[in-house]
Amino acid sequence: MNRLASETSPYLRQHADNPVDWYPWGAEALTAARELDRPVMLSVGYSSCHWCHVMAHESFEDFETAAQLNSRFVPVKVDREERPDVDAIYMEAVQAVSGRGGWPMTVFLTPDGRPFFAGTYFPVRDLPGVPGFRRVLEAVDDAWRNRRGEVEKQADALLEAISHHTRLPAPSVEEGETRAYALVVAAARQLEARFDPEWGGFGPAPKFPHPTLVDLCLLHHRLSDEDSSKQMAEQTLGAMAAGGIYDQLGGGFHRYSTDETWTVPHFEKMLYDQAGLVRTYLHAWQVTKDPRWLGVVTETVGYVLRDLSLPGGGVCSAEDADSEGTEGRFYVWTKSEIVDVLGADLAAAASQWYGVTDAGNFDGRCILRRPLGGPLERPAEIERARRLLLAARGERVRPGRDDKVLTEWNAMFGSALAEAAGATGRDDWGSAAVSIAEFLLSELRRRGDGRWLRSWQDGRAQHLAYASDHAWLIELFTRLAELTGEYVWLERARQTAEVMLELFSEPGRPLYTTGTDAEQLVVRPVELTDGATPSATSVAAAALLRLGALCGDVELTARGESLLEAQMPLAAAQPLAVAGAVTSATMGGDGILEVVVGWDRRDLLGTVRARYEPNAVLAWGQRTDSVLWEGRTEALAYVCRRYACQTPSSTAEELEERLDTERALDRSRFFAARGT
């Protein structure tokens, strides 16, 4: 058993019995490499990564390969979900060397941490165009021993390439509101160019959900009233919900689709995908009132709370793609298996509904899906079949579950859940969101000084939290303040915001990934663009603007606008690469809408929450010292911008009228900025 046995990451512990003499990332490994004069072989992956498992079985469990690694290298294993800083730095090296990235990530480093050769999955034996892993080890070892000068030169070049990606392009000349709306227009036009009009989504296979891009479509529709952007959103959401990427029996989304029709997914399920898609489908329901989208929200939340939640409030990170050694085995069916569960008559109806055939659509078996454009709401007969099939599937060997709790992903899901609870009136969802927040407050802060930590597993938390963790915590606490009307959540949001700005910010820059108190890496990483989730800076900017408006804190508002400004050069150059920043940009200036509702007017609360108002904040419940509450009457609702208010509303109809007026104002500003 190697050094990984005591780690909190289930992914690292999966490798504890390897014959490879693994180190976790840290000073011990780099010191050993320096003293032994060996390169570091860094392997980065995560627990639900299929090809990570394949490479582990082929190479890291092989005694001859392990002997080669142990005698010539210092092997280091990293869970990318626990250490996104390490992952981000060396992924830049992989992309610089190969032009693409992915996991498992395999990077060879000098003892001071500079990368000099990098790749992703290496097969156990040579394949056409891809060398086998042992051949790679031989070549790297030879270069290190006999061509050290070339290695040093390559390490310096790759380090410069990594550093280059932390630099911003020159700023554009447009400013303020005009620029924000121009970015939304530019992003919408680029989405139209990439849109698949038949199957939805943006770009060819493999297709990822990209909820931020769908939200951009909905925002553009709200501002422009153009049907084309709403149609792109609905076509994409409908195709995903009908496809195999959506778990038709248990709810929730797999990571991505390998084909253009959303049929064959990579079967892992990630918490951050559920969080992003719950929010996007919720917004689509608010815009259209189409019950299909609320159904997807309900089933996805149900999946997370049923299968990923831990006692006490934390939520697990992911479920694997594999079970019983086969990807997707847990989810796929044969026609005969369905007959065995349902009987002939009900099986015939279910097979027709889910497209089950004798030939199958995935290695002779069937991934359940609905036809594109077909109804998603299940008739009673099909719902009965679904429940029976789900129960039968529950008897199978489940995919492995990564039960570490990540602060960022939990805060992301809790935030979406709080927003959904308010919009739908689901008190149980609200209670679950509060439980997640309380778990994080209890378990993910360092004893003594309260420093936020990144990862928790089995009673132990470790790794200093990153900018993204803090940004999503501010968003979560602010959403809970809006949901519950309790001041304590605003106070927690403010405290977290102060820490985030102290540890991660410098004037005129996006947030650094790591804090000033963190381990010093070869470069201090900055997350400039969106990945599977929006960048920390775009999340933080929006969260600070919302929090500043609710608290009447001009300093927080200014810091949010400063973070927006830092992203604008890149947004002007590549709006879809920073879609989160583009959506946040409309919140700057006079973009935030402030709504204050008296304590006993739950009818007026429901009016606000049912609408798609992406830039609105809602104050109600406990009064605070914010200027939002000055002179307010309990029985009325107030709609304001920068504390300048319309006539108070005493009825839901009046409040709808005030909100519609503000929406019309947004549209007039949008068209004025667009020049039409």
Image (cartoon, rainbow, N blue to C red):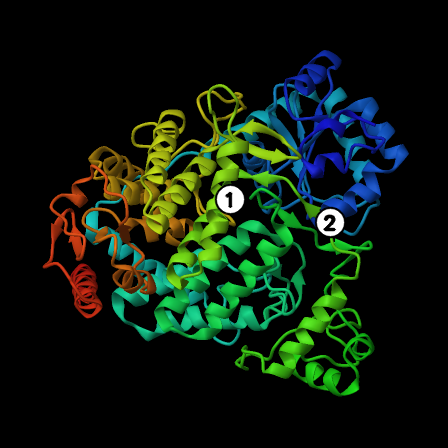
Q: Which residue is mark 1?
A: 436
Check contact, mark 1 vs mark 2: CB within 8 A. Answer: no
**Nearer-the-camera pick, 449 or 554:** 449
Most extreme residue toward the right is: 64
Q: Secondary structure at mark 1?
A: helix
Q: Name the amino acid, label 1.
A: Ile
Q: In the rendered image of this protein, does residue 529 appear above or below residue 636?
A: above
Q: Is residue 94 visible?
A: yes
Q: In the rendered image of this protein, does residue 130 appear above or below residue 110?
A: below
Query: Which residue is painted at 47% across and 41% down in the image?
Result: 437
Asked whether, in this view, residue 491 is left or right of residue 41, the answer is left
Q: Residues within 10 Å of mark 1 (few under 14, many from 20)?
A: many
Q: Secondary structure at mark 2?
A: loop
Q: In which quadrant is the C terminus drawn?
A: bottom left
In percent of width and height, residue 604 lies at 25, 62
In percent of width and height, residue 78 lies at 66, 33
Q: Is residue 533 visible?
A: no
Most extreme residue toward the front is: 600
Q: Name the amino acid, label 2.
A: Gly
In percent of width and height, residue 617 lies at 28, 51
Q: Which residue is mark 2?
A: 400
Which of the marked residues, 1 or 2, is nearer the chain's N terminus?
2
Q: CA distance from mark 1 to mark 2?
A: 22 Å
Q: In front of the other: label 1 or label 2?
A: 1
